[in-house]
Image (spheres, rainbow, N blue to C red):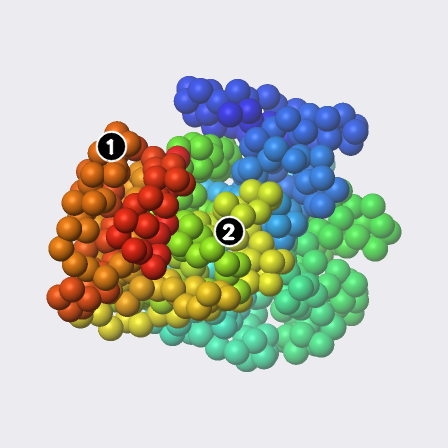
Amino acid sequence: MKVLIIDAIAQEGVAHLTDRGFDVEQVSSKMPREELFQKIAGSEAIITRSSTTVNAEFLAHARRLRFLGRAGVGVDNIDIDACSRQGVIVANAPYGNVVSAAEHTVGMLLALVRKIPAAHAALKHLTWDRGIYGSELFRKTAGVIGLGKVGSRVAARLRAFDMDVLVYDPYIPESRARDLNVRLTDLQSLLTQSDIVTVHVPLSDETENMLSVHEIALMKPGVRLVNCARGGIVSEVALLDALDSGHVAGAAIDVWTEEPPVSPQVKRLVQHPRVVVTPHLGANSQEAQVNVAIDVARQLVAFRDGELVEHAVNVPVGDRESMAELRPFVTLAEILGRFCLQLEKDNVERVAVEVAGHVAHRDPELIGRAVLNGLLGGVTAQAVNLVNARFVARERGLEVAIATDEAAPTGYTNLITVTTYAGSGRKIIAGTVFDGVPRIVRLRDLHIEFVPEGHILVLSYEDRPGMVGKIGTILGRRNVNIASMHVGRRTKRGNAIVVLLLDEDVPPEVMEEVAKAVEADFARVIRLEG
C-alpha cells in the first residue's frame, strides 16, 4: 500500500510501516498546492499533521484515498463529512499526546501565576529583580471545562496542588467526576466560582467562542484563563478587552485562531504583557511525537489487514473491549446484508436491523452499518464501506432503522435480525455467533442453522419424498458437490426451506433445472466467496 506522509512524524512511526511492507513517501505541507495535489493523487493512505487542511478540494485530487491518519488528537483541519462521503476512514491518535498536553497546560498555568516568563526575561538581561510576586494555587478553585482525555489529567494534576476543582462537561456521568475527586457543575457556576479557568474541549460549531463577552463577564474579577486546547474556543476579542480592563488578571495561551498570527488583533494578544504564550507546543514532547506516530501507524496496519480501526473518528468502534466483542458480529452483519441482497430480486426500500442480547449493550450503529455495507456493496458503482454506508443509503432513498433489545432471545445469547421490505414483500434473516463463527439461524419465518460460506443454494418447496434425491442427482450430474444440507420446516411434508452448501458454483441453468424438478416456489444461489 502506498502511503504519503505530509510533514514529518517520528521515525519510529515510519519504521513501523516500512517494516511491514508499506511504500512510504514523506513530503512537506509547505510545497506548492498543485505539486501536493499531484502527490496525493496516487496515495491509498495519507498521514498528516494539523498544518494540512483536508477539505473537498483536497479529496477531489485523492480519489484512491482509503485511509487518512491524523498524527495527533484534533481533527478540526479535516472535513470529516467529506471524507465519509468518499468512503475514507479518518483515524487520529487520541492518547499519544494527552500526557504531554496536560503537562503543558499545568506548566503554562504555573508560569502564569508565578510570573516565571517575566522573571526569566529580567534575569537574562542581568536585572536582579526580587520584587516579582506571583500567586499560589494552594486552596484556590480551578474550573476545568471538558473532562475528556486531557481535561481529566489536568484535573488530577490540579488536585495534587490541593485545589478545589470544578468541572463542566455535559457528556460525562457523576461517577466519573467522583472517581477524580472533582465536582461536576453547570457552566455558570464554574465561571462565577473559579479563580482559574482552563478549557479542554474540541473546536466545533458548539464550542466556537464558547467563552466570549458574556461568559468572561461572569468570571471572578482577577480570574486567570488558560487555553491549550484549540484556538477559537475563547473569543480573542473578548479576552483582549477583559485583559485591558483588568477583569482578567492574566492568560496562558498555546493555541490561536491564526497560526502563525497575522492580524493586528491576534498579534496584540500574543504581545500582551499579561499573557504567557507558546506557539502550539502542547503535543511537542519527544515522547508524544513517538506515541502519536506509532499509534496512527498501527491503525493503518490494522486497516490494511482488514481489522477494525481502533480510533476511527467516522466509524463507531467504541473502546478496545467493545471492538473485541463486536468484531465477529460485524462480520456476521455484513454477511447478513450480502445474503439479503442476493435473496431479494426487487429493490429494497427499507431495512430494519435488530440487535438483541448481550451485544445490544454496545452501540448498534457499527452493526447496522455493516449490514448496509453488505446490502449495498453489490449494487452501487461507488465503493461502500463502514464509513460511508449511511451516506450511500440516504442518497439511494433507503430507509434504515436500527433497534436494540437487551433481553436475550430464547435459545441465543445474542441475535442479529435483518428484515428487508421490497416490492415482493418482507424477508427476514437472522444470525448469531458461536465460538467466534457467524451462523445463520433463521430464514423467512423458519428456523434453520448453518455456517454461511462459499456457494449456497437456497430452495423453498413443499417437502415430500424423493426431493433430496432429485436435487442430488442433478447436481451430481453437473459435477457440483454438496458439502452439507440444512432444512427448516414447521410441519411434516409442509413448506420447507432447504439450504445446500456447495463446493462449486451453480450456473443459472442448473439452478433452474433443480427448481423445476422440486417445484420450488423460490430458488436463489448466494455467493459469499471473496
Dot 2 or dot 1: first in sequence order is: 2
Residue tagged 1: 477
Question: Is 77 placed left or right of 400 in the picture?
Answer: right
Report the residue at 40% width, 54% height from top: 343
Residue at x 47% of width, y 55% of height: 345
Q: Is residue 503 above or below residue 464?
A: above
User: Is residue 73 something one can see in this rendering?
Assistant: no
Q: Give the spatial CA distance, label 2 vs label 1.
A: 35 Å
Residue 298: give x, y in percent of width and height: 42, 34
Q: Position of residue 393 (x, y in %)?
A: 56, 58
| Nearer to me, 467 or 43 | 467
Task: Tell me the amino acid under the disc marked 2.
Answer: Leu
Say few, some or many: other residues with alpha carbon within 10 Å of mark 1 (under 14 / 14 to 19 / 20 or more): few
User: Residue shown at 70%/31% (left/top)?
Assistant: 29
Residue 403, horizontal then vertical, whole percent: 39, 70
- Under tag 1, what secondary structure? helix
Q: Is residue 129 left or right of residue 333?
A: right
- Residue 495 lies in quadrant: bottom left
* Depth order, front residue of 445/211: 445
Please state if 272 lies on the left or on the right of 427 as rendered.
Answer: right
Query: What amino acid is found at the position of numbered circle 1 in the picture?
Result: Arg
Q: Given the current orientation, which residue lies at the most extreme right position?
A: 264
Q: Is residue 174 above or below residue 70?
A: below
**10 Å neighbourhood of mark 2: few (<14), some, or many (≥20)?**
many
- Of the pair 469 and 169, the residue shown nearer to us: 469
Vertical relation: 155 (above or below) 47: below
Nearer mark to the viewer, of 2 and 1: 1
User: Circle 2 is placed at which residue position?
Assistant: 376
The kind of secondary structure element at disc 2 is helix
Q: Residue at x 30, y 45 (%)?
A: 514
